Image (spheres, grey):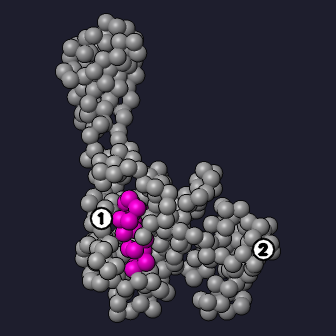
Amino acid sequence: MTSTLPPAIAVTGLRKSFGDKVVLDGVDLTVARGTVFALLGPNGAGKTTTVNILSTLLAPDAGDARINGHDLAADPDAVRASIGVTGQFSAVDNLFTGMENLKLMGDLHHLGRTRSRERAAGLLERFDLVEAAGKPVATYSGGMRRRLDLAMTLMGDPSVIFLDEPTTGLDPRSRRDMWQIVRDLVADGVTVLLTTQYLEEADELADRVAVLDHGRLIAEGTPDELKRRVPGGHLRLRFATARELEAATRALPGAVPDGEALALRVPGEGSGRALRALLDRLDLESVEVAELTVHTPDLDDVFLTLTGQGRPGKQATR
């Protein structure tokens, strides 16, 4: 049965300028419920500005935006009641313990003493912070602080979460721990809008990816769809003998042989239809392939090609 619920996030014609600098120039976004939507772009592309507008921290100059069907301008309180925000920098109080930070968020959400304590205890267990619950946050590692920060975001039980570069500064293990937390949230039905400087992160987590550049949305699709838009995909065939390599080279015009590795590089996107056609052609020539691998462009290639800039930096972006 088709759902009649509105999308988790719906944005049309979003615009924002700071003085004479245009930061968002007519952005359209639709984010389905229970998915991860990643927003990529170089420094200054408008990613954090988009998050600040959608979380009601900043008013747009023009455009329409709705969260769970609630209009940002007409019903901001309903929007705030359904969202959670984890910013680029942890919003935890170093002098409080982990439990005290969570109880403070419970008070801000008017949960009541009993419900607040129960929810805090459940989140401490979920984020593997039970043993550290009574310790000052100043003693926490970077990964623990980020987990606590996200737990604080979840105290209000939001259905939509904005994660603005949530793993910046984390070590690889802590970053992967955070990825698993995001996957678990989505499995529970939460919608996540993620901005990130780590292209691998978007590839790992996102159902759909949008690329912002100079305030404009220049591409959108699944990670695989975006990769197919970038040239450079190829098939690599390896053969057992030089004779088979030579025969395959003759059978596949445009292929580039590597005699030392007994391998052949064949331009192509690696779709099922293309693979079948290639293998059928080699079969007609009685050529047997010892090994076949598909190489596709990654999101680094997509980013570089679409924006014409270097890889994203590690600095905070507006």
Residue 136 numbered mark, or none = 2
User: Under tag 2, what secondary structure?
Assistant: loop
The magenta-colored residue range is 34-54
Residue visible at 77% across and 67% down? 139
Q: Earlier in the sequence, mark 2 or mark 1?
A: 2
Q: Is residue 174 left or right of residue 277?
A: right
State the residue lying farthest toward the left: 253
Near-viewer residue (141 or 288): 141
Q: Is residue 83 above or below residue 37?
A: below
Which residue lies under the disc numbered 1?
214
Gap between marks 2 and 1 measured at Cα:
42 Å
Near-viewer residue (287 or 144): 144
State the residue lying farthest toward the front: 20
Mark 2 residue crowding within 10 angstroms, few (<14) / some (14–19) / many (20+): some
Q: Quadrant of residue 3?
A: bottom left
Q: Is residue 46 magenta?
A: yes
Q: Is residue 111 visible?
A: no
Q: Is residue 148 left or right of residue 60?
A: right
In which quadrant is the N terminus drawn?
A: bottom left
Percent across and percent down for residue 74 are 34, 93
Mark 1 residue crowding within 10 angstroms, few (<14) / some (14–19) / many (20+): some
In which quadrant is the C terminus drawn?
A: bottom left
The three-letter code of the residue at mark 2 reads Pro
Percent across and percent down for residue 239 are 37, 15
Q: CB of mark 2 within 8 Å of CB of mark 1? A: no
Percent across and percent down for residue 132 are 78, 68
The three-letter code of the residue at mark 1 reads His
Residue visible at 25% across and 73% down? 26
Count of marks, rendered view? 2
Q: Is residue 100 visible?
A: yes
